[in-house]
Image (tube, rainbow, N blue to C red):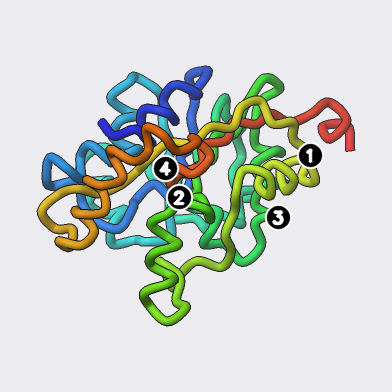
Amino acid sequence: MNARVAAVLSEVRGHRVLNVGCAGHARPDTTARRARWLHGALVACGYSVLGIDVDEGQLEWMRAEGHEVLELDAQRLDELDESFDTIVAGELIEHLENPGLFLEACRRRLTEAGRLVLTTPNAFGPLYWLTYASSGGRAANPEHTCWFDGQTLSELLRRSGYRVERTHHVDDLRTDAASSAGYRAFAAAWGGARRVVPARFRHTIVVTAAPDTAAREQ
């Protein structure tokens, strides 16, 4: 289990969990991929998990493996007819065209004591600086519509009717054989350097938030 998955699991509360963007980009068919597979880790911990995604091809094999999944866009959560103790959205919000509407819909789908757990790449992570510097100005992932740091994500959550309970930073670097030699070299170097670098420069932000009372009354 990698640091991002472990951080998310430490923040989950209650029994019923919605995992938004559950499918990921590849089947967890290697040890390295299984260590990063958030949906599998949630199920293995004993939570009742509904996963949603728009990738029907990926959802098909998840159904075949017995997972409860539904094809649904993350920005259409109001079509669901139940509430959840925890909503998890791992590496998702940076892909959306309207993150604020997504957060507001999540708020309406949480139970009274529910919480939202988000992870997203940290705009100030050194790997992304290096990628941007060496690629002629291209971001690390061309599918991203926006970048966040802890401050901007917290402000967006506040405007969307939440109070932030915790923000912390972890590293979520792939070091398996499928990674490039340059990437693996960076990961090895960063493993030593991060001991003296403030945690706010690590590559993944993990934020836990809960709806505030005033927002629920609106």
Q: Residue at x 71, y 39 (%)?
A: 108
Badge 3 vs badge 4, beta-carbon distance below 8 Å = no
Which amino acid type is shown beneath numbered disc 2? Glu
Which amino acid type is shown beneath numbered disc 3? Leu
Q: Which residue is mark 2?
A: 91
Q: CA distance from mark 3 to mark 2?
A: 17 Å
* Secondary element at tag 1: loop
Disc nearer the start of the sequence (2/4): 4
**Label 2 Cα crowd, 10 Å radius (few <14 / some 14-19 / many 20+):** some
Disc nearer the start of the sequence (3/4): 4
Q: Position of residue 156 (x, y in %)?
A: 72, 48
Please identify the quarter of the rendering in which residue 178 is found.
bottom left
Q: Which mark is residue 101?
A: 3
Q: CA distance from mark 3 to mark 4?
A: 19 Å
Above or below, 63 against 58 in this view is above
Please identify the quarter of the rendering in which residue 129 is found.
bottom left
